[in-house]
Image (spheres, grey):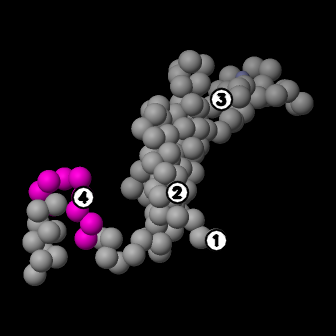
Amino acid sequence: MPESLVDLEHQRNAILQQMLRMPDFRSGSITATRGTCGKANCRCHQPNQPGHGPNYRLTRKVNGKTVTETFATSAELHKAQREVETYHRFRQLAQELLEINEKICRVRPVEQELTPSKKKRRKSSSRKWLAK
Ligand SMILES: [Zn+2]
């Protein structure tokens, strides 16, 4: 049995409510790198020694170019990790929102598009349109 319009609209509202409660988010991905430093006598240049790090950096695309950000403190890193995770959650919710909307579009009958909305301005204009 297909889902009713009311159910679908409730699901859509639930997603929108979750979006309203979302904290800050940003795109990008955080990766850890290890490497050697510039000091030739440092232990990191010895065989079988781990390099320095891990160093975390965030990369993201801006106008097609990859932009890299580094973090001065672990607090900055953790903040960015939360923001990036929230963005993934946002993307998931946006996909769900699109799917629900597509279902609503399929279920909603044509004549309901002219149902007066809660806005007074549209109410009067759609009434006029119907009376034509
Ligand atoms: Zn070193």
Residue for point 14% across, 53% down: 120
What residue sits right under mark 4 in the picture? 117
Q: Nearer the viewer, residue 90 or 3?
A: 3
Residue 7, label in figure: 2
Label 3 Cα neighbours within 10 Å, binned few <14 / some 14-19 / many ≥20: few
**Residue 127 in sight here:** yes
What residue sits right under mark 3 in the picture? 55
Q: Quadrant of ligand 1?
A: top right
Q: Nearer the viewer, residue 99 or 32?
A: 99
Query: Residue 55: x percent and y percent?
Result: 65, 29
Query: Residue 32: x percent and y percent?
Result: 68, 35
**What is the span of residues highlighted in magenta in the rendered image?**
114-122
User: Identity of the amino acid at label 3?
Assistant: Asn
Separation of residues labelled 2 and 3 (CA atoms): 48 Å
**Residue 26 in sight here:** no
Q: Does ligand 1 reach within 8 Å of label 2's beta carbon?
A: no
Q: Nearer the viewer, residue 35 or 117?
A: 117
Image quarter hosting the N terminus: bottom right
Whether residues under marks 2 and 3 lie with C-beta atoms below 8 angstroms apart, the answer is: no
Separation of residues labelled 4 and 1 (CA atoms): 28 Å
Upstream in the sequence, badge 3 or badge 1?
A: 1
Whether residues under marks 2 and 1 lie with C-beta atoms below 8 angstroms apart, the answer is: no
Q: Nearer the viewer, residue 84 or 77?
A: 84
